[in-house]
């Protein structure tokens, strides 16, 4: 799976959009970009994933650059409950490799 | 609830004892995964089930660890003769298995402490 690079930490004001970047410059054509988050003392929570096109669901939007070398997770109106570590994962489309590997992630602190 | 359920949520036991951790996946999810997360660390893959079979058990750290799944539903992770280094949060996840792009949905884990 391609390596990802994320900032170690970010702050965001409550009610504002949180934009979390992820660099995956070595991504290959059949690798998906996934985002998960982990709130303290809870299991990881799936947020969104995409291949080429931008995606939106009830939690967030995922913007993938045209060359697919980077992406941004957008939480449109951050709340205090969004304080968590956010993980960007690039996953190879190989039925044999099903385990998730999390890197260090970005610690997002939403400020009141 | 509709999510992945794990029990117990916390387990404290003495070194050398056996423990059993249970996972109830989301109904209909045929893929099930066990991971371990030590304090402040990332996820460590243990084993993957497709139905009741385990095509990938490459992450089990030793023969003290075993897992089974029955009825394409509940899974049990058993650790025999526990050691202090087994202390961690054990996480279970499940997913549809129709494609590798299907996201995994996690339970809140069992926090295992070995005295």
Image: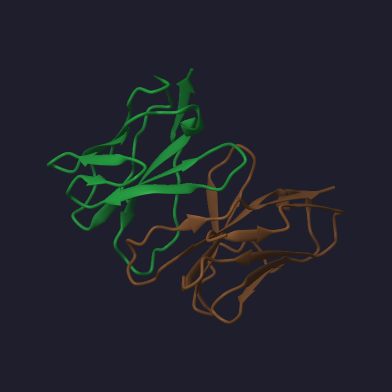
Chain colours: A green, B brown
Query: For residue A11, what is the image quadrant?
Result: top left
Q: In this view, does A46 lie above or below B78?
A: above
* Left or right of residue B64: residue B97: left
Left or right: residue A3 compared with residue A36: left
Tell me where residue A97 sits by quadrant. bottom left
Q: How many labels does the image show?
A: 0
Residue nearest the viewer, comparing B15 with A87: A87
List x then y, in percent, for residue A18. 35, 27
| B14, A54: nearer the viewer | A54
Residue shown at the point (44%, 58%) measured from the top left: B104
Can residue A97 be seen by looking at this rendering? yes
Q: Residue at x 87, y 54 (%)?
A: B14
Residue A73: quarter of image: top left
Residue B43 x %, y %: 53, 49
Which residue is rendered at x = 47% and y = 47% of the image? A45
Up/down of A97 relative to A90, above or below: below
For this view, does B70 lie left or right of residue A81?
right
Quadrant location of the N terminus of chain B in the rendered image: bottom right
Image coords of residue A105 (percent x, y)? 44, 36
């Amino acid at each position: 799976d391609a390596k990802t690079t994320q900032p170690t930490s970010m702050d965001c004001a409550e009610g504002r959009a949180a934009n979390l970047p992820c660099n995956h410059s070595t991504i290959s054509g059949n690798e998906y970009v996934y985002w998960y988050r982990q709130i303290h003392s809870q299991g990881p929570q799936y947020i969104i994933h995409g291949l080429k096109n931008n995606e939106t669901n009830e939690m967030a939007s995922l913007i993938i650059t045209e060359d697919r070398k980077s992406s941004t997770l957008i939480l449109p109106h951050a709340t205090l409950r969004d304080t968590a570590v956010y993980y960007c994962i690039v996953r190879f489309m190989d039925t044999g490799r099903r385990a998730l590997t999390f890197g260090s992630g970005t610690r997002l602190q939403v400020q009141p | 609830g509709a999510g992945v359920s794990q029990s117990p949520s916390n387990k404290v036991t003495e070194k050398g004892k056996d423990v059993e951790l249970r996972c109830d996946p989301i109904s209909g999810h045929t893929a099930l995964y066990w991971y371990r997360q030590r304090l402040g660390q990332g996820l460590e893959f243990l084993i993957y089930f497709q139905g009741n079979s385990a095509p990938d058990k490459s992450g089990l750290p030793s023969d003290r660890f075993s897992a089974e799944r029955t009825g394409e539903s509940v899974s049990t992770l058993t650790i025999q003769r526990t050691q202090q280094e087994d202390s961690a949060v054990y996480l279970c996840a499940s997913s549809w298995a129709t494609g590798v792009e299907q996201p995994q949905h996690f339970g809140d884990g069992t926090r295992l402490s070995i005295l």
